[in-house]
Image (cartoon, grey):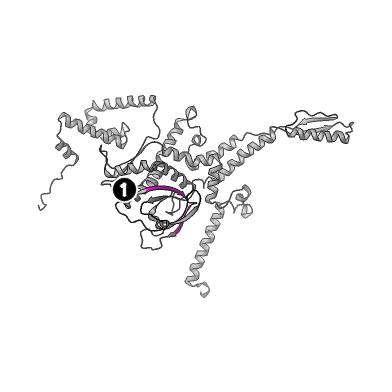
C-alpha cells in the first residue's frame, strides 16, 4: 500500500507534466509529425512551417495574390456602401447623432474601420489609437483617460499587432478587466524617426476576430489555410517553371559513326550552342551531327490548383468564384451570389458591427467624447448588392400584387397586422417597416379615423388598475 502513496504536491506536478505531454503529443499529431509511427514528418517533407509568426502572414499578404484576396475581398464587400448610426428615425438629429456624423466625416472613420479590419485579420488583434486633446506630451499616453466634457478626439490611427505589443495585463482577479491588457507599447513614426510609447488601454480600442477561449487574441485569417497557400505557390510557380523548361525543349545530337569531328569544329559547335541558348542564334550549322528535339513535358495545373482553392473556399466561407475574381457577369451563378450575400451579411452582423463599430462608439461614450444616447443606438447598412433595373421592376410588380391581395382581403388584414405583412411578405427591413407604419399612422390621423391622442394611446395603452390596488 505504501508504494502507491504520493505527496499531493508531487501528484499535482505529475498531472501537470502528463497534461503538458499529452498536449504536445496532440499538437505533434495535428502538425503531421507523429505519422507512420513517428517515422515521417509530413510538415517537414512538404515544406510547411510548424510555427507561424505575424511576419509570415504579412509576407504572404504582400506577395501572394490569393492571400491578399482572402484578406481584402470580404473586407471591401462588407464595408461597401453607406453606414449610418442612428438614435431615432426623427427628421432632426439628436446630440448623439450630430456629434457622431461630425466625427465620422472629419476623421474619415469608415476608412479607418476598413484599415483596422484588414490589420485585425493579419494578426491576432489590432488596435485603434485614440488621439485625444488631453495629451500634451508623449508621457501622457500612459495615463488613464479622465472622462469629462470638452474632451475631443483629434485623430485615430489603426495599428497592427506588429506595432502594438501588449506590455502589461490586469492581474487583479477582483477587477472586471482581469486578464485583459492594461498597457501597450506602440511604435509610432513621424516620417523620420520611430518611437515606442507606452499607452494606457483607455486610449485604444482593442479589435479581435474569431475568438475561442481567449478574449485578447483572435485567430489570423490566413492561419488555417497557410499550408494551402504554400501548395498554391508550388503549383503556380512549378507550372511557370515547367513551361519555361518544357515549352522550349532541349536537343540531343546524334553524331554520324563515320564522321570525325575536328577540335575546331567542336569549338565552333559549342559557340553556336551557347548563342542558340542565349537567343542570339536561331539556326545551328554543322556537319555530321543530327539534332533531335526532346519531347515536351507540360501538364495542365488547373485541376490541382482548383483543388487547393476549393479547400480554401471551404475553410474561409468565401465562394470560389469570388476568390478567383470571376464573381461578375455570366460567370457568376445565382447560388454563388446568394452565398456571397449571406457571407457578407453575416460578417456585418458578427464582426463589423459588434467587434469594431460598437466597441469604438462605446469607448467614445465612456470617455464622454460622444454624448450618451437616450435610447440604444442602431447601426444601419446599405443593401449588400443593389438590384438591377430589371430586378427592381420585377420585385415592385410582385410587391404590388401582394399588397393588392392583402388590401382586398378583409380576413387577411384581421389575421396579419400591417407591420408583420410588410416584414414577412414584402421582405421589408426594419427601417422600411418603421417608415411604413409611420406613414400609416399619419394617414389614419389625416383621414380622421383616429385623433393624435387616440393614436398615442393605441401605441402605449394604459394598463388597467387592479381593484385590489391601494391608491
User: What residue do we see at 33% from left, 24% from top?
Assistant: 397
Whether residue 180 is visible, yes or no, is no
Q: Residue at x 50, y 67 (%)?
A: 13
Q: Which residue is mark 1?
A: 370
Q: Is residue 272 above or below residue 116?
A: above
Q: Position of residue 244 (x, y in %)?
A: 67, 35
The location of residue 447, given as percent across then percent down, is: 16, 28
Q: Which residues are magenta?
A: 154-167
Query: Is 131 left or right of 406, judged from the image as shown?
Result: right
Instruction: Give the secondary structure at mark 1.
Output: loop
Task: Indicate whether residue 402 is drawn in magenta.
Answer: no
Q: Position of residue 318 (x, y in %)?
A: 47, 39
Asked whether residue 156 is drawn in magenta, I would say yes
**In this rendering, position of residue 148 left or right of residue 139:** left
User: Hey, which residue is sitting farthest bottom in the picture?
Assistant: 2
- Residue 160, x across and y down, in percent: 47, 49
Amino acid at each position: 500500500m505504501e508504494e502507491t502513496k504520493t505527496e499531493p504536491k508531487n501528484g499535482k506536478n505529475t498531472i501537470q507534466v502528463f497534461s503538458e505531454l499529452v498536449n504536445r503529443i496532440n499538437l505533434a499529431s495535428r502538425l503531421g509529425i507523429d505519422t507512420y509511427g513517428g517515422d515521417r514528418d509530413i510538415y517537414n517533407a512538404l515544406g510547411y512551417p510548424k510555427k507561424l509568426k505575424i511576419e509570415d502572414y504579412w509576407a504572404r499578404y504582400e506577395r501572394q495574390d490569393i492571400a491578399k484576396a482572402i484578406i481584402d475581398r470580404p473586407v471591401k464587400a462588407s464595408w461597401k456602401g453607406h453606414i449610418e448610426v442612428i438614435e431615432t428615425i426623427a427628421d432632426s438629429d439628436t446630440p448623439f447623432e450630430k456629434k457622431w456624423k461630425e466625427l465620422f466625416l472629419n476623421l474619415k472613420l469608415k476608412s479607418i474601420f476598413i484599415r483596422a479590419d484588414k490589420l485585425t485579420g493579419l494578426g491576432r488583434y489590432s488596435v485603434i489609437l485614440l488621439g485625444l486633446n488631453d495629451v500634451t506630451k508623449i508621457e501622457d499616453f500612459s495615463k488613464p483617460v479622465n472622462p469629462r466634457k470638452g474632451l475631443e478626439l483629434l485623430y485615430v490611427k489603426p495599428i497592427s499587432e506588429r506595432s502594438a505589443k501588449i506590455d502589461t495585463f490586469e492581474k487583479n482577479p477582483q477587477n472586471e478587466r482581469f486578464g485583459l491588457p492594461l498597457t501597450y507599447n506602440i511604435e509610432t513614426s513621424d516620417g523620420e524617426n520611430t518611437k515606442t510609447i507606452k499607452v494606457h488601454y483607455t486610449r485604444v480600442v482593442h479589435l479581435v476576430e474569431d475568438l475561442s477561449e481567449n478574449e485578447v487574441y483572435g485567430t489570423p485569417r490566413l492561419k488555417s489555410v497557410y499550408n494551402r497557400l504554400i501548395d498554391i505557390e508550388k503549383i503556380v510557380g512549378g507550372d511557370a517553371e515547367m513551361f519555361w523548361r518544357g515549352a522550349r525543349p532541349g536537343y540531343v545530337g546524334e553524331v554520324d559513326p563515320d564522321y570525325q569531328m575536328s577540335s575546331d569544329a567542336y569549338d565552333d559547335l559549342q559557340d553556336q550552342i551557347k548563342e542558340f541558348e542565349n537567343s542570339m542564334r536561331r539556326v545551328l550549322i554543322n556537319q555530321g551531327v543530327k539534332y533531335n528535339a526532346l519531347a515536351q513535358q507540360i501538364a495542365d495545373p488547373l485541376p490541382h490548383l482548383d483543388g487547393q482553392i476549393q479547400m480554401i473556399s471551404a475553410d474561409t466561407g468565401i465562394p470560389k468564384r469570388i476568390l478567383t475574381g470571376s464573381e461578375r457577369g455570366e460567370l457568376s451563378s445565382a447560388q454563388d451570389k446568394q452565398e456571397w450575400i449571406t457571407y457578407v451579411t453575416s460578417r456585418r452582423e458578427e464582426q463589423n458591427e459588434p467587434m469594431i463599430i460598437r466597441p469604438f462608439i462605446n469607448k467614445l461614450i465612456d470617455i464622454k467624447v460622444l454624448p450618451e444616447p437616450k435610447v440604444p443606438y442602431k447601426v444601419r447598412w446599405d443593401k449588400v448588392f443593389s438590384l438591377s433595373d430589371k430586378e427592381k421592376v420585377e420585385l415592385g410588380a410582385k410587391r404590388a400584387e401582394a399588397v393588392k391581395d392583402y388590401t382586398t382581403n378583409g380576413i387577411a388584414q384581421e389575421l396579419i397586422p400591417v407591420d408583420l405583412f410588410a416584414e414577412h411578405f414584402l421582405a421589408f427591413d426594419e427601417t422600411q417597416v418603421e417608415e411604413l407604419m409611420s406613414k400609416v399612422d399619419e394617414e389614419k390621423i389625416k383621414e380622421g379615423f383616429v385623433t393624435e391622442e387616440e393614436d398615442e394611446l393605441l401605441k402605449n395603452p394604459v394598463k388597467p388598475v387592479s381593484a385590489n390596488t391601494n391608491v
